[in-house]
């Protein structure tokens, strides 16, 4: 392990020396790029030469940080080798490699490197690559619980995937946007996204059976808005959209929940949720939103009791 760190530092020093010397037509940057690439590989190898149990945490982190910073130097060298698309692509990939090293130690630096990579992929017209790394940026923001930035970058990724006709990836990102939008109480935005994905699913024979799940999510978001008329109208709209929906457990669940809200009956609401959950287990996202609906219903019931 120590040998790999030492070798990496030796390659890095040679690269720096190349950059400070003379060279023709970008040759010194090309030579330095090769040395930086070797250095970065050595730094990555340093952390895997021994088991983590015998590896100093400080050295473990240092090896990833050194690999990340060296890949950034490699990217800068590639940009100076020539203005060709190939050089820009290599620079973008070096930024991606840097980001993947920094993910182990410094999420902020990882995001910064991925943003640089995305800008370069956009410049050279590699939009599907840009979409891929927009999604990765979104996932990093999600891991940091930065919901607003996660939404922003999932939306960017979805737009790029859509423009490249990569519909499955686009819809995966849109679902993330809807999920987070609902969490921060942007219910109408979530409703519109889920309904749009349901429409797309119904026009595809391979995806149409999943439409009821998207309509269920849209319906739960409608419930969170607290408007019984709106959910009733939505259910009518969903039946027109998908004539088979009215015969599903999801439709019955939403209709029964809407009925319990209209009757201001918390007990009925709880029973409906329990029954559905026993047949189709609710995930944490749905459970959280339904608890919000229940709390509003309980508050309204208490208010009515106080008046009487």
Image (cartoon, rainbow, N blue to C red):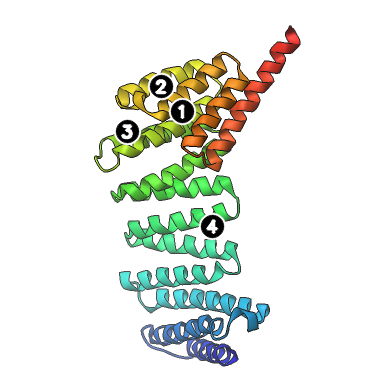
Q: Is residue 84 above or below residue 11?
A: above
Residue 199 image label? 3
From this viewpoint, is residue 55 visible? no
Distance from the alpha carbon under mark 4 to that under mark 2: 36 Å
Residue 235 image label? 2
Residue 289 image label? none
Q: Is residue 99 above or below residue 299?
A: below
Dot 4 surroundings within 10 Å: few (below 14), some, or many (20 or more)?
Answer: many
State if disc 1 and disc 2 touch (CB < 8 Å).
yes
Task: Provide the residue designation for mark 1.
Answer: 219
State if disc 1 and disc 3 touch (CB < 8 Å).
no
Mark toward the start of the polypeptide (2 vs 1) = 1
Dot 3 surroundings within 10 Å: few (below 14), some, or many (20 or more)?
Answer: some
Mark toward the start of the polypeptide (4 vs 3) = 4
68 sits left or right of 131 in the view: right
Mark in the foreground, 4 or 3: 3
Secondary structure at badge 3 equals helix
Distance from the alpha carbon under mark 2 to that under mark 3: 14 Å
Give the residue drawn at x 41%, y 21%: 235
Task: Provide the residue designation for mark 4.
Answer: 140
Residue at the limit of the structure toward the right, as seen here? 306
Mark in the foreground, 4 or 2: 2
């Amino acid at each position: 392990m120590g040998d790999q760190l030492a070798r990496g530092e030796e390659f890095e020093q040679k690269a720096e020396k190349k950059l400070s010397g003379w060279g023709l037509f970008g040759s010194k940057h090309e030579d330095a790029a090769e040395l930086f690439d070797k250095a970065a590989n050595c730094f990555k190898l340093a952390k895997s030469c021994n088991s983590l149990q015998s590896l100093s945490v400080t050295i473990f982190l240092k090896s990833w940080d050194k690999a990340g910073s060296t890949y950034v130097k490699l990217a800068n060298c590639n940009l100076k080798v020539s203005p060709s698309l190939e050089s820009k692509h290599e620079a973008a990939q070096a930024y991606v490699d840097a980001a993947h090293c920094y993910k182990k130690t410094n999420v902020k630096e990882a995001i910064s490197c991925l943003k640089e990579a995305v800008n370069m992929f956009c410049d050279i017209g590699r939009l599907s690559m840009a979409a891929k790394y927009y999604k990765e940026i979104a996932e990093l923001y999600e891991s940091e619980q930065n919901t607003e930035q996660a939404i922003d970058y999932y939306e960017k990724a979805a737009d790029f995937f859509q423009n490249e006709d990569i519909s499955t990836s686009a819809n995966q990102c849109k679902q993330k946007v809807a999920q987070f939008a609902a969490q921060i109480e942007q219910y109408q935005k979530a409703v519109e996204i889920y309904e749009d994905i349901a429409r797309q699913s119904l026009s595809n024979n391979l995806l149409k059976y999943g439409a009821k799940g998207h309509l269920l999510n849209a319906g739960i978001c409608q419930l969170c808005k607290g408007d019984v008329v709106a959910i009733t109208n939505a259910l009518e709209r969903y039946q027109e959209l998908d004539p088979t929906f009215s015969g599903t457990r999801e439709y019955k669940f939403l209709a029964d929940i809407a009925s319990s809200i209209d009757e201001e009956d918390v007990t009925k609401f709880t029973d409906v949720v329990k029954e559905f959950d026993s047949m189709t287990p609710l995930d944490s996202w749905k459970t959280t939103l339904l608890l919000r609906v229940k709390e509003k219903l309980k508050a309204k019931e208490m208010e009515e009791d106080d008046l009487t």
